[in-house]
Image: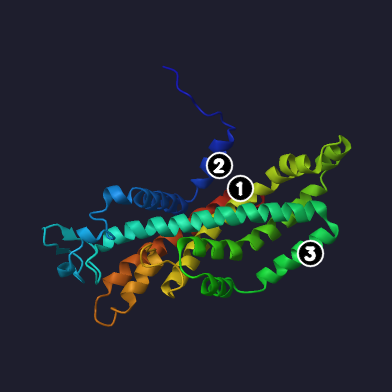
Amino acid sequence: MNTAVLPASSPLREFTAGYARSGIAVAAFIVLLLILGAALCAPLISPQDPYDLKQLDIMDSKLAPGSKSAAGWPYVFGTDDQGRDMLSAIFYGLRISLGVGVFATVAALAIGVIVGLVAAYAGGWVEAVIMRVVDLQLSFPSILVALILLALLGQGVDKIIIALITVQWAYYARTVRGAALVEKRREYVDAAVCLGYSPMRIVLRHIMPNVLPPLIVVATVQVAHAIALEATLSFLGLGMPITSPSLGLLISNGFTHLLSGKYWISFFPGIALLITIVAINLVGDQLRDVLNPRLK
């Protein structure tokens, strides 16, 4: 029986072999897949819907890990002050944190790529104006800009996404502009100009494909940054509303109970957040090593 085999020089084979050289990166990738699976399948694998009031029992509030509910099934990570199962709350919180982080990063990447390409190819006063705006944006700490925006906009998933996009797009714009300036001086761009191709076609079909691969690595790491920033803002009470809990909000909810010994309400969401961010960063670091020819 014939089986499909990748050729020895397959780019996919080379990429897989290069990534597999690091056992830590492979383990991080597996952990990240498990986290994504838990977030996507939260309604199916969670013992309860922690935000359905019909499923909550105030008599089960602040139960220690391993305690049993009135119905007889165990609370593996305990419960919070509302009687919510912490394991279920973490699964649902992962959905919010990952969704917000990925969506904000993709949107900021799209805006940054467009702005950076326009600045690099247009040049002149257009580039000068755009880069002054970018420099102004990057001169302020991300957390400060996000805090000011959320203080003006209020709480909400859409508000936190707008804040994250605002603090991220300038970084991509500067990165793309630098890479595009290098590609703009290549011979193939000069040839395209001589052939009479439009600036739009040159930018989209010739320059952009050559500046995107490095951005994939940058975007991977920025997802972890967006998740951490969202968790920080939610912990401070300026991010997600109580009806759309993220891991940061779960940590904040349990912070007031730490001194009374109810450590698990904040501890387990904090561990989930830490593992998620570390796994994403490890995967991004290995992608950088594999995709950057200078590091081979």
Q: Earlier in the sequence, mark 3 or mark 1?
A: 3
Residue type at mark 2 is Phe
Percent x, y of residue 35: 38, 53
- Residues at discs 2 and 3 in contact (Cβ within 8 Å): no
Kindly state the secondary structure of the residue where label 1 is placed: helix
Which quarter of the picture shows residue 192? top right
Q: Which residue is labeled 3 in the image?
A: 129
Q: Distance between the residues labelled 2 and 1?
A: 8 Å
Kind of residue indicated by mark 1: Leu
Residue 179 sits above or below residue 147 on the image: above
| Residue for point 49% across, 70% down | 154
Q: Give above or below for 237 relative to 227.
A: below
Residue type pointed to by label 3: Val
Residue 142 in picture, x, y percent from top left: 58, 70
Dot 1 crowding, Cα within 10 Å, few <14, some 14–19, many 20+: some
Residue sitting at the far bottom: 259
Q: Badge 1 is on which residue?
A: 291
**Above or below 151: residue 15:** above
Q: Quadrant of the N terminus?
A: top left
Tag 2–tag 1 contact (CB < 8 Å):
yes
| CB contact under 8 Å: marks 3 and 1 | no
Q: Nearer the viewer, residue 264 or 146?
A: 146
Residue drawn at (27%, 60%) of the image: 50
Q: In this view, does 260 lie to the left or right of 219?
A: left
Residue 15's mark?
Answer: 2
